[in-house]
């Protein structure tokens, strides 16, 4: 096969081309047709791990997955498809987000990637990007809002409370027990055992502990929310029978301290990765054996506990305000890095705006303030590095939204869907997001739906707040 044909199949690296040509000759000698060979080559390019034991294409699979040699930072040769393989889900993905994924997979530490159907442009790794790295952690592949997460609580209260005089009590509970915005805090500081953890694991967390404590139990800004709604379960799950329940759903992360951890260690990573191309600066990494990486990892895990504590306090205080028990809970991170086993090796899996979806693992995928959020159970698909989307995904930037959208149209949509918005910005109205039903349809092989949540009473940061996401 000539260079043009191999480039089209995704083999731009010289070593990969040579290995591909040897495999082609081997396949021809075994009587394979040209069509069979081309199909197999495409399969190896997309997922080399599946061909490691193939009698014909194992050498090519090994060439594509071989760990990089130590040395200076470099991009892989030629066209970006010559980097680590990745698969994408979804229709009409933003070409800029796809390019960011390709660039991430061009890193010498990249092993494999996946792009979810809610993908849109981010810093370094796109939102909705999943990247497995060899013995390295990439701060901006985790993201600024470290450990941003979802939490759903099912309350022992009839869903009819959303319709009758009790709705005012629900509104007061959210307004009283939540805070939104960059400087959000409570007059009476809230407490949680997370503040007894070791905050000296990094200079950033040590210096910002007081700020973290002041913001404990708050929600920040951007696309973060707290909302009441109806949980529709089509089958028995979470120890509950099929039916309709009143539920509380929240979305937020590690606030200002998490953002500062990302910024500090991304700067550190850039100082370690001399010679990175300009478009890869936000993908600078730290080898896991270095002190800097170990510091970041400890800080990241602390931010995971802190983000979980924020949600726990929000849900606990709202339930106590209402005087009702919690029947069931589900929660998950979607901006984090994990040490996992994939393709027979230990890798660092970064999920930036992607939900863990190992077989049997529960998660929540929100849409918009006027559309469904889905309760899902992971199917453990290895092609996606056991991941699924973290939401519907933006189609209109915040700047564009403020220019081209109107509150009159947004409020009409909210009214049609019986949603009362307590506060929020025009840059978070339903029109800025993809259709969640289309997104879910694109990832049926990644997670199964167990039920859905329909928002009815929504609170977000007031208009004009600078986003933290």
Image: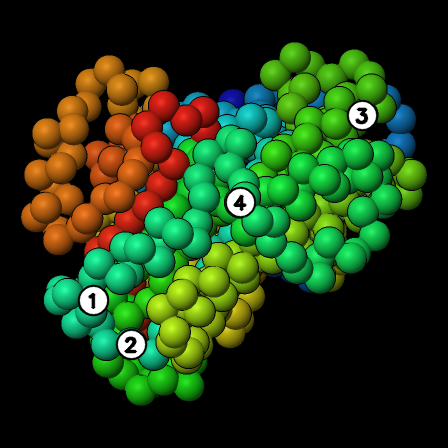
Q: Are marks 2 and 1 in contact (CB under 8 Å)?
A: yes
Q: Residue at x 26, y 28 (%)?
A: 426
Does dot 3 land on a helix, a strand or a loop? helix
Which residue lies under the disc numbered 3? 268
Q: Residues within 10 Å of mark 4 (few under 14, many from 20)?
A: some
In this view, 18 is above or below 59: above
Question: At which x and y percent is residue 123?
Answer: 56, 26
Q: Earlier in the sequence, mark 3 or mark 1?
A: 1
Which residue lies under the disc numbered 1? 166
Question: At which x and y percent is residue 415?
Answer: 10, 46
Q: Are marks 4 and 2 in contact (CB under 8 Å)?
A: no
Disc ID at residue 359? none
Q: Earlier in the sequence, mark 4 or mark 1?
A: 1
Does dot 2 land on a helix, a strand or a loop? loop
Mark 4 or mark 2, whichever is nearer to me? 4
Mark 2 or mark 1, whichever is nearer to me? 1
Q: Nearer the viewer, residue 336 or 422?
A: 422
Q: Nearer the viewer, residue 64 or 169?
A: 169
Q: Earlier in the sequence, mark 2 or mark 1?
A: 2
Mark 4 or mark 3, whichever is nearer to me? 4
């Amino acid at each position: 096969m000539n260079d043009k044909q191999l480039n089209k199949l995704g083999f731009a690296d010289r070593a990969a081309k040579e290995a591909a040509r040897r495999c082609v000759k081997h396949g021809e000698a075994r009587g394979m047709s040209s069509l069979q060979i081309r199909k197999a080559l495409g399969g190896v390019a997309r997922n080399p791990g599946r061909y490691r034991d193939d009698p014909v294409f194992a050498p090519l699979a090994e060439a594509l997955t071989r760990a990089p040699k130590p040395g200076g930072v470099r991009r892989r040769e030629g066209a970006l498809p010559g980097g680590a393989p990745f698969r994408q889900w979804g229709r009409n993905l933003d070409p800029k987000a796809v390019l960011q994924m390709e660039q991430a997979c061009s890193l010498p530490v990249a092993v494999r990637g996946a792009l979810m159907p809610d993908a849109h442009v981010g810093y370094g790794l796109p939102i909705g990007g999943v990247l497995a790295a060899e013995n390295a952690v990439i701060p901006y592949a985790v993201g600024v809002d470290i450990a941003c997460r979802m939490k759903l609580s099912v309350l022992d209260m009839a869903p009819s409370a959303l319709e009758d005089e009790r709705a005012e009590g629900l509104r007061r509970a959210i307004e009283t027990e939540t805070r939104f915005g960059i400087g959000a805090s409570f007059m009476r500081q809230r407490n949680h055992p997370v503040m007894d953890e070791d905050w000296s694991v990094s200079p950033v967390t040590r210096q910002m502990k007081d700020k973290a404590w002041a913001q404990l139990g708050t929600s920040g800004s951007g696309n973060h929310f707290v909302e009441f709604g109806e949980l529709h379960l089509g089958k028995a799950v979470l120890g509950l029978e099929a039916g309709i329940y009143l539920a509380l759903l929240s979305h937020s992360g590690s606030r200002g301290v998490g953002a500062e951890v990302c910024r500090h260690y991304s700067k550190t990573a850039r100082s370690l990765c001399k010679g990175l191309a300009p478009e890869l600066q936000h993908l600078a990494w730290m080898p896991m054996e270095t002190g800097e990486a170990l510091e970041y990892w400890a800080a990241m895990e602390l931010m995971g506990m802190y983000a979980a504590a924020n949600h726990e306090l929000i849900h606990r205080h709202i339930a106590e305000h209402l005087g009702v028990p919690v029947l069931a809970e589900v929660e998950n991170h979607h901006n984090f890095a994990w040490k996992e086993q994939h393709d027979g090796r230990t890798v660092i899996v970064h999920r930036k705006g992607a939900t863990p979806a190992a077989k049997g693992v529960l998660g929540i995928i929100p849409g918009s303030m006027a559309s469904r959020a889905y309760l899902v159970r992971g199917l453990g698909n290895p092609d996606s590095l056991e991941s699924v989307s973290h939401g519907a995904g933006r189609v209109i930037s915040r700047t564009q939204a403020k220019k081209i959208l109107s509150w009159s149209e947004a409020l009409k949509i909210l009214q049609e869907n019986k949603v009362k918005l307590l506060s929020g910005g025009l840059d978070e109205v339903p029109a800025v997001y993809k259709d969640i039903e289309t997104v879910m349809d694109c990832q049926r092989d990644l997670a199964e739906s167990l039920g859905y949540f329909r928002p009815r009473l929504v609170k977000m940061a007031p208009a004009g707040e600078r986003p933290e996401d």
